[in-house]
Image (tube, helix red, strand yellow):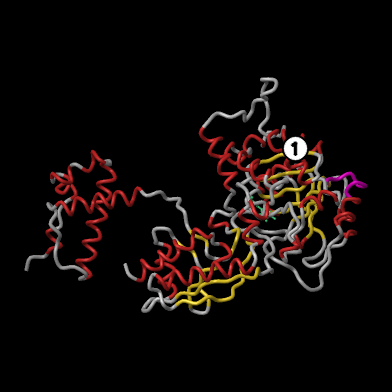
């Protein structure tokens, strides 16, 4: 018997074949060798498993074309567009906020042409990148000064380093949060060179707990938004105004890590618990920090707003350079913040707020359209179902937004297999599995993405 395993050629033998020898010039030698190695490994596996019993014709143009296609596939971008049909509006794994066209246009300009990033055009002198958004942030938050850094984690670290290194930070045991990944408040405080003084209990912290903990070493009272969990039941925490009064009296700084940071009241959309930045500033908090790419709806950024003297010390801190915001994000942030001003309506212009404020009828119509399109492309087992969407991004963890979804079942395919196939689609689609079915929540899907979902499902059903 002629064992095809023994006839598998060497890589070099293949590279010497005329059709394959052209590939290193068209792509590169390492990519060609890599593709050949993978194709041979797959062949070996298929032969061993009995999935195939013969070798292809290595001299045929089909074989070199196959190798070329493998190289092209390996060259596809790693960071790709996907469709968020999870119902989680701000999904960290999917890149958080999608931005407004105005923000994208501003990045396009800042990326493709020189800008006055650090140049004062009126005087011709060196300017500061912080100048481009400070007045806007002050206008929208009521703060007297502001500065922007790379993200909210950097904002918290920089703020603590500039105010509390070598001293103590008082924080409630109910607010020692972890935001996923490596952001844990006690660790960040330690990293800043400050010591943490924990007060109160997990569910209850009183004003007197803070008061008793303040001593000559204390630099900061730190509040943080318990953004991704909720303590319910027998709970208490002091009013911010009382804390602010205590901080002033004891000459320490009251800081608040807000996480999401919303600039407008979301109560009209049924989201009552998310504090508005301007209210927090008004209550007397000295410094607040929040993200640019959560509920604000802009690029990754960390915004710090508050007292002028503290902001000035942040701007001149040695760490500032290491955490500064880049020009593309700065351009996008300025453009996003401008959409919060008249004549614009941020709930119409900013995608995150639009998804959050879309009426349930709008979402239902989108779900109907997807279900109809699926039927048109031959997917019969589909239904429109009520669903609960979430804000995500560590905001309002307990509140569901009324929503609608489309469920899909493909004959002979488990839900797990279907979601795996959807991840490998030309435009990957991220849904959820609910009660044994794959569902697409339409609150986080834009109108122009509806046909892309239908196409992905249709190609899986009939490849
Ligand atoms: C999300 C969050 C952060 C971290 O913000 P990034 O912009 O991701 O760095 C910090 N604190 C709170 C309370 C958050 O919710």
* Position in image of residue 21 (x %, y %): 17, 43
**In the foreground, 87 or 149:** 87
- Point out the image quarter for the N terminus: bottom left
Q: Residue at x 45, y 62 (%)?
A: 451
Residue wearing tag 1: 135
Q: Is residue 36 left or right of residue 429?
A: left
Q: Is residue 426 left or right of residue 335?
A: left
Count up the numbered dots.
1
Q: Give the quadrant of residue 453.
A: bottom left
Q: Look at the numbered disc 1 and give the secondary structure of its residue.
A: helix
- Point out the image quarter for the C terminus: bottom left
* Position in image of residue 305 (x %, y %): 76, 43
Q: Residue at x 24, y 64 (%)?
A: 45
**In the foreground, 222 or 387:** 387
* 305 over 463 or under it: above or below: above
* 375 over 24 or under it: above or below: below
Q: Residue at x 65, y 48 (%)?
A: 292
Magenta segment = 247-253
Q: Give the quadrant of residue 219.
A: top right
**In the foreground, 404 or 376:** 376
Which residue is farthest left?
Answer: 1
Q: Give the quadrant of residue 147.
A: top right
Label 1: how many residues lie within 10 Å, few (<14), some (14-19) or many (20+)? some
* 395 over 314 or under it: above or below: below
State yes or no: residue 379 in magenta: no
Q: Is residue 281 left or right of residue 398?
A: right
């Amino acid at each position: 018997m002629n064992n095809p395993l023994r006839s598998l050629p060497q890589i070099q033998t293949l590279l010497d074949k005329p059709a394959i020898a052209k590939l290193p010039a068209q792509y590169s030698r390492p990519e060609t060798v890599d593709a050949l190695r993978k194709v041979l490994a797959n062949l070996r596996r298929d032969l061993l498993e009995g999935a195939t019993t013969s070798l292809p014709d290595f001299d045929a143009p089909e074989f070199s074309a196959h190798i070329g296609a493998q190289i092209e596939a390996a060259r596809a971008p790693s960071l790709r567009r996907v469709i968020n049909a999870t119902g989680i509006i701000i999904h960290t794994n999917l890149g958080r906020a999608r931005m407004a066209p105005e923000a994208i246009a501003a990045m396009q300009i800042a990326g493709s042409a020189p800008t006055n990033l650090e140049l004062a055009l009126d005087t011709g002198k060196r300017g500061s990148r912080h100048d481009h958004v400070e007045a806007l942030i002050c206008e929208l938050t009521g703060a007297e000064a502001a500065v922007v850094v790379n993200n909210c984690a950097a904002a918290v670290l920089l703020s603590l380093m500039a105010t509390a290194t070598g001293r103590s930070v008082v924080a409630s045991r109910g607010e020692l949060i972890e935001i996923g990944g490596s952001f844990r408040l006690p660790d960040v405080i330690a990293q800043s060179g400050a010591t943490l003084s924990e007060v109160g209990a997990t569910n209850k912290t009183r004003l007197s707990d803070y008061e008793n903990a303040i001593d000559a070493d204390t630099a900061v009272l730190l509040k943080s938004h318990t953004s991704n969990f909720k303590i319910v039941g027998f709970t208490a925490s002091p009013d911010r105004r009382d804390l602010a009064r205590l901080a002033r009296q004891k000459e320490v700084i009251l800081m608040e890590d807000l996480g999401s940071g919303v600039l407008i009241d979301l109560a009209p959309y049924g989201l009552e618990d998310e504090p508005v930045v301007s209210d927090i500033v008004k209550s007397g908090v000295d410094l607040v920090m929040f993200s640019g790419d959560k509920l604000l709806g802009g690029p990754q950024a960390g915004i710090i707003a508050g007292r002028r003297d503290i902001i000035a010390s942040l701007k001149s801190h040695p760490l500032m350079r290491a955490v500064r915001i880049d020009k593309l994000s700065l351009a996008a942030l300025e453009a996003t913040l401008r959409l919060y001003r008249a004549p614009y309506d941020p709930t119409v212009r900013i995608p995150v707020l639009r998804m959050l404020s879309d009426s349930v009828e709008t979402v239902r119509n989108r779900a109907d359209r997807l279900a109809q399109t699926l039927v048109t492309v031959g997917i019969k087992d589909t239904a429109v179902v009520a669903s609960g969407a979430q804000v995500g991004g560590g905001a309002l963890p307990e509140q569901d937004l009324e929503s609608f979804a489309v469920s899909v079942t493909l004959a002979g395919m488990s839900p797990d297999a279907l979601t795996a196939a959807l991840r490998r689609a030309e435009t990957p689609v991220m849904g959820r599995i609910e009660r044994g079915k794959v569902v697409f929540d339409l609150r986080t899907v834009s109108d122009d993405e509806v046909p892309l979902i239908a196409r992905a499902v249709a190609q899986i059903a009939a490849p």
